[in-house]
Image: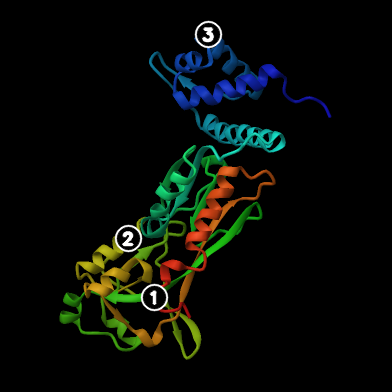
Amino acid sequence: MARQFDPVMLGSIELFCLAAELESFTAAATQAGLTPAAVSRAIGRLEARLQVRLFVRSTRRIRLTEGGRAYLAQCRQALNQLVEAERELTGRQAAPAGVLRISVPTTLGHHGVLRLLPGFRRRYPQVQVEVHLSNRNVDFIADGFDLAVRARAQPDSGLVARKLMDAALVVVAAPEYLAQAGRPVTLDDLAQHECIQFVLPATGQRVPWAFRLDGQDIDVNTDGGFTCSEDLLGVVTLARAGAGLLQTYRFIVEEDLARGELVELLQPYAGRSRPFSLIYPANRHMPLKVRVFIDHVLAALGNGPLQSAQHPPG
């Protein structure tokens, strides 16, 4: 096999990652024990090899170009895999370590995953956790994530999906709204009510409401004067304020229902749920920090312990 990289070029890649992280050739040089000119030459060698400009330079700072950002994400992953492969081979990794980057939806983030992180860090103090709260699907390579939690996983042969839980759906409203508008009794009654809408970030489409009727799963398109996008917790806040009816995950509103601040509706048509899964790239050499985090989350949330006091998902 012909050599693709010499030691100088591999060193240039490491210096490129360091300079990108610190946003400074001078800071990278100081940390690496080199001169700023040596770092600049190393970046120049990379740019000449790739025939792509990696940084936009000014007198005060540097910033990555679009090509530089894409190259950085892949270089970080490649260097991390080399480190993990070496640790696995030599048996030097006695404890998980490094930065773990995860993307979590706002719903299961606030009501599940974030609550698990302090315990995870106490158990693995050498792992630093960076959390990205978003309902959008992420690009693991370009965005540099180790894993994500998603309710609607996109099919991708390069990804592994490990199911966490089935999250039961429920229709709720505030007592104040029901006092003014009345309670819906059948699914046909939904057409006479304000139904708070959530728009999926990936498609820009409103989410149909999911019900079970005579043993069959059905979806119902509802309408209303309030629409939220990006953060699903926004529609819950609207429902609490009396804006209308809402279908959401039961685990989000369990405490509101117990306190009487929200009322459950249309129970004869309940029984639908949506799965949440852990998504991560298929990788023969999975970093230990990723492996132990997956085990930690599955142990806590696997089979839906958040629903332990809830109705079965049907």
Report, in whole angstroms, how far the alpha carbon at label 3 lies from the one at label 1.
63 Å
SS category of the residue bearing label 1: loop
The residue at the point 46 percent across, 57 percent down is: 202
Residue located beneath label 2 in the image: 233
Say the numbered circle drawn on residue 185.
Answer: none
Decide if residue 18 is on the left or right side of residue 93.
left
Q: Is residue 100 above or below residue 258?
A: above
- For badge 3, the amino acid type reads Ala
**Would you call the spot at circle 2 few (<14 residues within 10 Å), some (14-19), or many (20 or more)?**
some
- For badge 1, the amino acid type reads Gln
Say the numbered circle drawn on residue 310.
Answer: 1
SS category of the residue bearing label 3: helix
- For badge 2, the amino acid type reads Leu
Residue 269 position within the rendered picture, expressed as x and y whole percent measured from the top left: 40, 85
Residue located beneath label 3 in the image: 37
Residue 302 position within the rendered picture, expressed as x and y whole percent measured from the top left: 52, 64
